[in-house]
Amino acid sequence: MSNFVYQRPDDLYPVQEKEPVSGACSACGTEELARYPVLSEGGWFMVVKCQACLHSESREKWHRLGHIVLHTDTIPHHDDERPE
Ligand SMILES: [Zn+2]
């Protein structure tokens, strides 16, 4: 049994799809916002970035291994329900 939820892509050159987001960039005013995952020094983030000036409109923590999701990461944990 594989521990991978996300299977290896079949295509030779996988391409990151960018989801168009409506609205204007708060830095340059261009209406070219897109949502997609990025890897930076702090790990993987799901960002909404202006495609003209690369200003980040939003930046939230994403999966710890990016596109690779392990079944063990999908097991619910109940930190909030731990008795004190
Ligand atoms: Zn911009």
Image (spheres, helix red, strand yellow):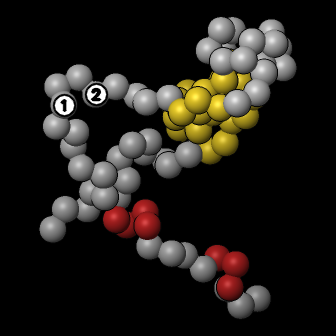
Q: Quadrant of residue 60?
A: top right
Query: Residue 75 at x, y = what percent?
Result: 44, 73
Q: Quadrant of residue 70?
A: bottom left
Please give the residue where the numbered disc 1 appears in the rendered image: 11
Respond yes or no on whether mark 1 lies under 8 Å from ligand 1: no
Inspect the image, locate mark 1, and give the three-letter code of the amino acid beneath it. Answer: Asp
Q: Is residue 30 above or below residue 58?
A: above
Taking 38 as reference, is 48 left or right? right
Q: Taking the image as drawn, is residue 4 in sight? A: yes
Q: Identify the element where label 1 is drawn.
A: loop
Q: Quadrant of residue 27?
A: top right
Q: Residue at x 16, y 37 (%)?
A: 10
Q: Residue at x 81, y 13 (%)?
A: 29
Query: Residue 26 at x, y = what percent?
Result: 84, 20
Quick one: label 2, few (<14), some, or many (20+) residues within 10 Å?
few
Inspect the image, locate mark 2, and give the three-letter code of the amino acid beneath it. Answer: Pro
Q: Taking the image as drawn, is residue 43 in sight? A: no
Nearest to the observer: residue 37 or residue 43: 37
Query: Residue 46 at x, y = what percent?
Result: 59, 38
Q: Residue at x 72, y 17 (%)?
A: 31
What numbered label is drawn on residue 14?
2
Whether tag 1 and tag 2 are in contact, CB under 8 A, the answer is yes
